[in-house]
């Protein structure tokens, strides 16, 4: 537990006061900050509100304010420097993930034994993706706790049938959906468990209804304005679903099923993924019905996610508690085969865990050390601070937050998301830079990399012309000396999984455009900045 906490907390303040992860910047913490004005309605339903409220009330408690009174002074401070708020959100994500680890130990111990619980907890504790998303104020790590509770309740619904387990499963499902809408897939194994129980106990129907009520109550308690603003909420959920069905700029078409299965080899760990498969096979032979209930959630997630155009390894995270439990079962049973003596079995389990955890633990430590160093974008900002006068005119690609410019630079375009930005890049844009006096151009590999993956000819022609007609005056690399450039992708490269990284951030290049003057023409004003 201590080691798992250390790899999460080391470098957890990465980037601050700037937040470079787009989802972290816009989806939860900024809403929690706005609510300090006194309005508890986040006016946002792209994602459920549980994490938003946890961050909000932690901030409110920290600043000593009681609802319904606003905290205008705190609101002003956090808008000027949101570091405290984002650090609070990241700390909450870490705490929730560590609670999931503790809960998985208890669940494994109750369902199988102490060895299974320890092994499952260790795997979830050090798997790369849960660790990586514990360092961000996002729901991906937070959902692991309620999913674990729900899975335990679902198994006990079928095997025990007492109402407490229907309530536990329902509450777990409701809380899980309060973190991520896709966790609603838990309803399927819950209904299957209730149906199996009903074959010998007709009161299971009443228990299922009670569990459904508990799920609804918990969800609406954690996302209350979903019901109040039902029309807007449903519209935003549909929009989110529509976005998932549209291709993401920078993602090439590929077999989604293969992608998600392959993601387990590094997100969970190759050894843990193989152990999970072995644990499932072992459980099928021992108790096929329990195996069915456990396997349903990962299978449903893979099938559901494979139907979307967009694909991200983190979307499969809600299935990780089940996979960790199954892996723990396999490792514990292998250890028992080694000897009848408890001491020998414990040593065998320790050796098996060391082998399985070597890969993810190395990635955890590597990425933590990377995040603790200065981001390339902050290094670039220091260079610009030294070289450009206040209000200096520059074009910088949308891989930085709005406060990156605050009080210092004049942006050369209206901020768009990176995916939309690359669709409008073209060689003629450089002529507009010259006419408007924007002579300093900052490019980032997180943007150019998308154009390269998509083979966007117009955007690539823009970069080639920029290189031909400009002088490269600054370059910041995130890689170790002698390491090869890591190709862009939305998963491992943005989480710094590769050993090639030395520091966080993209490759940043600053160009001085030739034949361009940033001096105001006599008697004339500047034309409007090139909006792209």
Image (tube, rainbow, N blue to C red):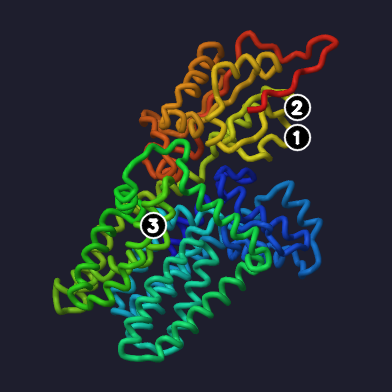
Residue 71: percent from the left, percent from the top? 79, 61
Residue occupied by mark 1: 407
On the picture, is 325 further left or further right than 455?
left
Residue occupied by mark 3: 304
Please tell me how crowded label 3 is: few (under 14), some (14-19), or many (20+) other residues with Cα within 10 Å.
few
Rendered residue at 69%/62% (across/down)? 59
Rendered residue at 60%/22% (across/down)? 441
The reply to whether callout 1 and callout 3 are in contact (CB within 8 Å) is no
Q: Quadrant of residue 531?
A: top right
Q: Quadrant of the C terminus?
A: top right
Q: Could you give the CA–CA distance between mark 1 and mark 3, rounded to whole angstroms?
A: 46 Å
Between circles 2 and 3, the one closer to the viewer is 3
* Relative height, residue 356 to residue 421 (above, below): below
* Relative height, residue 415 to residue 14 (above, below): above
Residue occupied by mark 2: 390
Who is closer to the viewer here, 319 or 383?
319
Q: Quadrant of residue 384?
A: top right
Q: How many marks?
A: 3
Element type at marker 2?
loop
Earlier sequence position, callout 1 versus callout 3: 3
Please tell me how crowded label 2 is: few (under 14), some (14-19), or many (20+) other residues with Cα within 10 Å.
few
Between circles 1 and 3, the one closer to the viewer is 3
Residue 339: percent from the left, percent from the top? 14, 75
Q: Could you give the CA–CA distance between mark 1 and mark 2, rounded to whole angstroms?
A: 7 Å
Element type at marker 1?
loop
Q: Is residue 57 visible?
A: yes
On the picture, is 368 further left or further right than 269?
right
On the picture, is 91 further left or further right than 224?
left
* Relative height, residue 286 to residue 462 (above, below): below
Earlier sequence position, callout 2 versus callout 3: 3
Earlier sequence position, callout 1 versus callout 2: 2
């Amino acid at each position: 537990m201590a080691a798992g906490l250390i790899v999460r907390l080391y470098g957890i303040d990465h980037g601050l006061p700037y937040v470079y992860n787009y989802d972290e910047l816009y989806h939860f913490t900024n809403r929690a900050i706005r609510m300090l004005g006194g309005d508890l309605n986040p006016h946002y339903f792209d994602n459920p509100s549980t994490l938003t409220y946890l961050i909000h009330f932690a901030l409110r408690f920290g600043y000593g304010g009681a609802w319904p009174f606003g905290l205008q002074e705190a609101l002003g401070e956090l808008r000027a420097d949101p570091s405290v708020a984002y650090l609070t959100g990241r700390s909450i994500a870490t705490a929730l993930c560590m609670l999931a680890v503790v809960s998985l130990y208890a669940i494994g111990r109750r369902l199988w034994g102490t060895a299974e619980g320890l092994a499952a907890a260790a795997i979830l504790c050090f798997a790369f993706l849960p660790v990586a998303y514990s360092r961000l104020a996002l729901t991906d790590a937070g959902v692991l706790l309620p999913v674990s509770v729900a899975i335990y309740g679902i198994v006990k619904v079928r095997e025990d049938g007492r109402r407490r387990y229907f309530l536990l499963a329902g509450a777990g499902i409701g809380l899980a959906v309060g973190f991520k809408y896709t966790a609603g897939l838990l309803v399927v194994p819950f209904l299957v468990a209730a149906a199996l129980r009903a074959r010998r106990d007709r009161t299971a129907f009443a228990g299922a209804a009670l569990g459904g009520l508990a799920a609804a109550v918990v969800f609406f308690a954690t996302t209350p304005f979903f019901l109040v603003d039902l029309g807007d909420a449903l519209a935003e959920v549909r929009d989110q679903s529509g976005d998932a069905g549209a291709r993401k700029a920078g993602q090439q078409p590929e077999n989604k099923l293969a992608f998600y299965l392959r993601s387990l080899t590094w997100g969970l760990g190759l050894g843990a993924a193989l152990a999970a498969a072995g644990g499932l096979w072992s459980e099928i032979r021992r108790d096929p019905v329990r195996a069915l209930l456990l396997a349903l959630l990962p299978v449903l997630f893979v099938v559901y996610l494979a139907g979307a155009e967009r694909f991200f390894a983190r979307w499969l995270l809600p299935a990780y508690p089940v996979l960790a439990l199954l892996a723990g079962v396999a490792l514990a049973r292998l250890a028992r085969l080694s000897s009848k003596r408890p001491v020998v079995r414990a040593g065998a389990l320790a050796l098996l865990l060391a082998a399985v955890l070597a890969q993810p633990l190395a990635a955890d430590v590597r990425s933590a050390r990377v995040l603790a160093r200065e981001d390339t974008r902050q290094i670039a900002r220091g260079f610009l601070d030294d070289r450009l006068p206040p209000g200096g005119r520059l074009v910088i690609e949308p891989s930085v937050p709005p406060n990156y410019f605050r009080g210092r630079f004049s942006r050369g375009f209206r901020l768009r998301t990176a995916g939309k930005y690359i669709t409008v890049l073209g060689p003629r844009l450089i002529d507009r830079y010259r006419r408007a006096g924007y002579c300093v151009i900052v490019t980032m590999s997180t943007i150019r990399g998308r154009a390269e993956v998509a083979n966007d000819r117009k955007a690539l022609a823009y970069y080639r012309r920029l290189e031909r007609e400009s002088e490269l005056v600054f370059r910041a690399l995130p890689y170790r000396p002698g390491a090869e450039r890591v190709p862009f992708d939305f998963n491992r490269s943005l989480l710094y999984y590769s050993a090639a990284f030395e520091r966080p951030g993209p490759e940043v290049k600053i160009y001085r455009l030739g034949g361009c003057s940033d001096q105001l023409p006599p008697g004339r004003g500047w034309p409007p900045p090139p909006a792209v």
